[in-house]
Amino acid sequence: MIHLNKVLIVGNLTRDPTLRYTRTGTAVADFSIAMNRRFESREGERREEVTFVPINAFGPPAESIHEHVHQGDSILIEGRLRQEKWQDEQTKQNRSRLIVVVSTWGYAANKAKPETLPTDQEPDAPPLTEPPETQPQQPTDTPHGSPLPPETHRD
């Protein structure tokens, strides 16, 4: 029997990551991301659904995320699901939630700010690109030809 616990998710940070350290000195970053799903109801009405996902990162990825990613930034996370279980102190009910644990991460959108643009490019100008016929073809990592995710960081 095959068991697979792999998550690939893209969303926007709902708040700045918090960073703490375990007693053994391991960095832990806690944050959450929001993902929007737009759809049309049976009545033809446009609707939007927001899903919030709690995320944990450990070690160097935690420190890197804490330093480089902030509220509102779009981020790509590759990781695994972990279930947390506890008993509510007031109601004595058993509770649980799923949390994503980061293995790698990357920016899901351009992080360039006007002060970091090349000097020959104005902040409102379109990004510098090659003409479409000369752009290199996106490499693929699957037999079906799906594109690779944006640059990821393996810390």
Image (tube, rainbow, N blue to C red):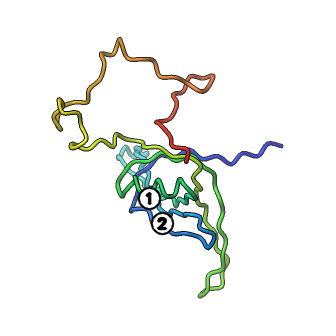
Q: Quick check: 133 above or below 20?
A: above
User: Would you name the residue on which mark 2 appears?
Assistant: 19
Provide residue 39's location: percent of width, then percent of height: 41, 44
| In the foreground, 17 or 68 | 68
Residue sitting at the far bottom: 90
Say what amino acid the circle numbered 2 marks. Leu
Provide residue 65's location: percent of width, then percent of height: 46, 54
At label 2, counting other C-alpha atoms closer than 10 Å, the crowd grade (few under 14, some 14-19, many 20 or more) is some
Q: Is residue 150 left or right of residue 78?
A: left
Which secondary structure lies at badge 2?
A: strand
User: Would you name the residue on which mark 1 appears?
Assistant: 66
Provide residue 132's location: percent of width, then percent of height: 33, 16
Residue sitting at the far right: 1
Q: Quick check: 139 above or below 102?
A: above
Q: In terms of sequence position, does the residue under pointer 2 or pointer 1 come before the other?
A: 2
Among the 4 quarters of the image, the one containing residue 34: bottom left
